[in-house]
Image (spheres, rainbow, N blue to C red):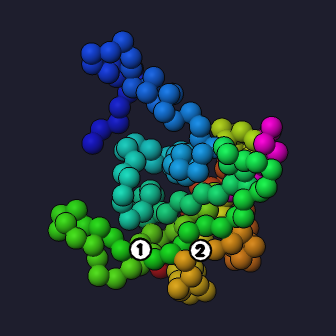
Amino acid sequence: MKKLSPNTEILGTPYFISDFWSWGFSDILMNSLRGIFSEFLVGSALEVLQKPRIEWDDHDLVYKNKKIEVKSAAYIQSWHRGKYSKISFDIGAKKFYDYDKSSYSVDALRHADIYIFCLLKEKDFNQVNVLDTEHWSFYIVRTQTLNNLYPRQKSISLSTLEKITRPVPYHQIKKSTNIIINEIH
């Protein structure tokens, strides 16, 4: 699969693929799109956006031959009605679907080497800007740490996450990820 250019024509219409993207994917505060956008943010910080995103892979990004899983959460959502969302990230083990064999793996595992948890931390609905990296915090954890401390846990709360790592701003994602990679044996 190759990346589409924003000026790719939608044949038979007067529109371009960028028109479709703008129409269908402008609400990036929505849970599903915010998750994909957080993958983009991490990928941009690590400079690994050369290939298009693969929807159902067992990891989200590859950096220095390490698989990275990106998870996202936010206090407020598009549909926010005054109550903040509880911050929790999915860390459950998953079965991997092998497209070559057309079957799932026997064992459920955490397939990535590193998890990067992305928190859209702004709590003011009138101020939140998903496109502003200052509104985000990033928590970077070795998968082995999760496996050692929480082997069967399916999710991790922000308070528990903050016991094992500290948040970093966008501009420190690459440096912090490199430190984690150097710790992996």
- Residue closest to the far top: 14
Whether residue 38 can be seen here: no
Residue 99 position in % (x across, y down): 22, 62
Taking 99 as reference, is 13 above or below it? above
Residue located at (37% from left, 44% from top): 51
Q: Quadrant of residue 89?
A: bottom right
Q: Is residue 123 magenta?
A: yes
Residue located at (58% from left, 51% from top): 31
Q: Quadrant of residue 131?
A: top right
Name the residue beneath numbered marker 2.
155
Q: Residues at badges 1 and 2 in contact (C-beta under 8 Å)?
A: no
Tag 1's secondary structure? loop
The local crowd at label 1, few if under 14, some if 14 to 19, many if 20 or more residues have their Cα within 10 Å, is some
The local crowd at label 2, few if under 14, some if 14 to 19, many if 20 or more residues have their Cα within 10 Å, is few
- Residue closest to the far front: 81
Mark found first going from the N terminus, 1 or 2: 1
Q: Which three-letter amino acid code belongs to the residue tagged 2? A: Ser
Give the camera-side residue of 55 and 111.
55
**CA–CA distance between discs 1 and 2?**
12 Å
Residue 144 position in % (x across, y down): 52, 80
Range drawn in magenta: 119-127
- Residue closest to the far left: 101
Q: Quadrant of the N terminus?
A: top left
Residue 55 position in % (x across, y down): 38, 52
Name the residue beneath numbered marker 1.
94
Residue located at (60% from left, 45% from top): 30
Q: Is residue 37 left or right of residue 52?
A: right
Q: Is residue 93 magenta?
A: no
Q: Which three-letter amino acid code belongs to the residue tagged 1? A: Lys
Residue located at (32% from left, 15% from top): 13
Give the camera-side residue of 12 and 54.
12
